Amino acid sequence: MLLRESIEALLKISLGDVCVRLSDEYGCHYVGADSTAVLPSKSSRKKRQVLIADEAGNEYAVAGILTNQHVDPLLLFEVCFAANQDKFMRNICTTHSAIRRRYHSIRSSIAILAGSWSNSSIAMMESHDITIFLIPFDFICDQLEKVGVDFRWGEKEKEKAFAAWENYNQLTNEEQDQIGRAMIQVIEARLFGRIEDILDESVPREVDKVIIELISNLGEVKIFEFDSVDKAIEFLEQEGLEAHFVLTDSVTLFEPPPVYES
């Protein structure tokens, strides 16, 4: 839907304004869909996209990237107005996991979601260490209503949808930009706080978790997590690690799915 895509584009621009202000304060750089910076890419699809590649050379489009002075990526941003939630949710989880395996400098991912989102979609993203900021659908509708755009219509109300699009196109650039600024203001204080925490260099680095992945010659995979380096080393030093693949502790096909707790 064109109006939904336009609102999403306004939100990306406003996000960029916030990140540019923060990057100036912290000596960082922000690369967004509307910035003049161009990242190296094997694709010609550069306009209005920020493309970043994984280890295999697969390129992914993201809403924005915050980098340090050496242009090492620190933070990934995504923006989405609630359309095809399942597809977006799965894409961001897959994309950001793949990107972070290549860029060890990335500290976090942030997704700004507009509209109504299901709890299951949010839980899935949070389980992949993605911080979520929500902008409610009713708030967006209220902002559009102030400038004469009715965004509340049913799936089959095509005439109302067309009228809304026509009225939106009659708005000045300043009126449209104000809608984007109003949306980002809903989350700006919390977003600022989260980004500042991520950029805080005064926090001493510690090993938070050690993950060991064992892969057998038959393709089986077992993952072990430890809360200290000593425990991980103790695990690796034991004999017969291959025995872990023949243990009958695998989850069966009929086991219920796990419940994610935030």
Image: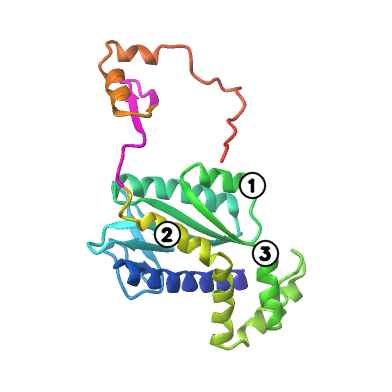
The label number, if any, that marks residue 119 in the structure image:
1
Q: Amino acid at mark 2?
A: Ile
Q: Quadrant of residue 48?
A: bottom left
Mark 3 vs 2, N-terminal side: 3
- Give the image location of residue 105, x and y in percent: 29, 51
The answer for how far apart the CA atoms under marks 2 and 1 are is: 24 Å
Is the image coloured rainbow, by chain, by secondary structure, or in one colour?
rainbow
Residue at point 29%, 11% (across, down): 240
Q: From which residue to which does the magenta span run? A: 204-224
The answer for how far apart the CA atoms under marks 3 and 2 are is: 24 Å
- Secondary-structure class at tag 1: helix
Q: Nearer the viewer, mark 2 or mark 1?
A: 2
Q: Are marks 3 and 2 in contact (CB under 8 Å)?
A: no
Mark 2 vs 1, N-terminal side: 1
- Give the image location of residue 38, x and y in percent: 30, 69
- Secondary-structure class at tag 3: helix
The label number, if any, that marks residue 137 in the structure image:
3
Q: Quadrant of the C terminus?
A: top right
